[in-house]
Image (cartoon, rainbow, N blue to C red):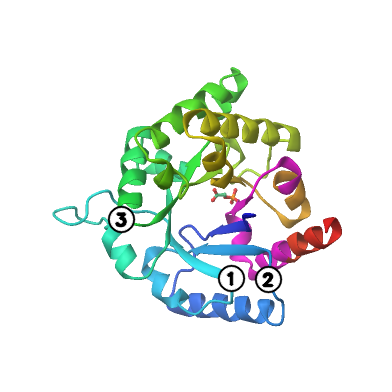
Amino acid sequence: MKKPFLLVANLKMNLLSRDEVKQYLQVLHRESEGKRITQAEVIMCPPILWLNEFNHLPEAFHKGAQNVFWEKSGSYTGEISPVMLKNDGIEYVLIGHSERRLYAGETNDIVRTKTHSALKNLLMPIVCIGESEEERRRGMTHSALEIQLEGIFSGLSKLQAEKVIIAYEPRWAIGSDRTPTTEEIREVKNLIQNYLTKHLDEGTAERIRVLYGGSVKSAYLGAVSWEAGMDGVLVGRESLFPYEIVKMLGLYEQYQLAIS
Ligand code: PGA
């Protein structure tokens, strides 16, 4: 079955009050009114405090958390259990975002532990991988990505593996208004696909969705996603504008119409 195009909206640490959240959601509902989304799915990832405010979303929109801990319960001050998320109706969770690697010291090992725990607790992890500027400059993009893929997938069954969503986010592209070329993204997509085929099998590799993230804008949505063979996008700053989210969904619908 064809995978629907996926747009993950990472609202990061924004929307500072309940009033701001309400306004944001009002605009989102207004912008999406009357626009049928048939070919895509959206996962809204607001700050954890506001997740319940996002209960009533337009059709085809789901909710995700921006972080999760690996233990189920206990003395882990400030952490959020995967069971809490699941019990509260959350389906998806972002893991290993480069901002968490940078500011919260998350390593590949932590990302692996969190990913495996999320899967055991029936959450679908959106796991971020990406090379640093230095790694890219030294021609180490592929080896850096392979190490991260190895961390995520080793020890997972095929059934677990196909629930993972990979977000390829070059670290230097996040928040920078710089993006790789379509060709560079396609190369990484092929690398990921080959890795997954080799370590799992072709069918499982096909079912795993691979997204591009890092300074995504509607102006060049196609170039960083479908033209590069990606299954969707992870959108940061632009997702603070509901108009942009709806515009991107519309562009994908138009593309689908054009090729059908
Ligand atoms: P950005 O963020 O779109 O603001 O670069 C991307 C992300 O959250 O990974």
Residue plotted at (45% across, 50% down): 163
Q: Are marks 1 and 2 in contact (CB under 8 Å)?
A: yes
**Disc 1: CA contacts within 10 A as few (<14), some (14-19) or many (>=20):** few
Front residue of this view, candidates 171 and 250: 250
* In the image, residue 147 lies in the stretch drawn in magenta: no
What residue range appears in magenta? Answer: 226-249
- Outermost residue, right direction? 258
Q: Position of residue 22 (x, y in %)?
A: 51, 80
Q: How many marks?
A: 3
Measured in 3D between alpha carbons, the distance from the residue under mark 3 to the one under mark 1, in whole angstroms, is 23 Å
State whether the magenta stretch is mostly helix, strand or loop: helix
Q: Does residue 185 lie above or below 159 as drawn?
A: above
Q: Position of residue 56 (x, y in %)?
A: 49, 80
- Quarter residue 107 falls in: top left
Asked whether, in this view, residue 207 is left or right of residue 250, the answer is left
**Disc 2: CA contacts within 10 A as few (<14), some (14-19) or many (>=20):** some
Tell me the number on the disc at residue 60. 1
Q: Amino acid at mark 1?
A: Ala
Query: Dot 1 lies on which element?
Result: loop
Residue plotted at (39% across, 43% down): 103
Residue plotted at (37% across, 39% down): 156
Asked whether, in this view, residue 168 is left or right of residue 79, the answer is right
Query: Dot 2 lies on which element?
Result: loop
Query: Residue at label 2?
Result: 37
Q: Is mark 2 within 8 Å of ligand 1?
A: no
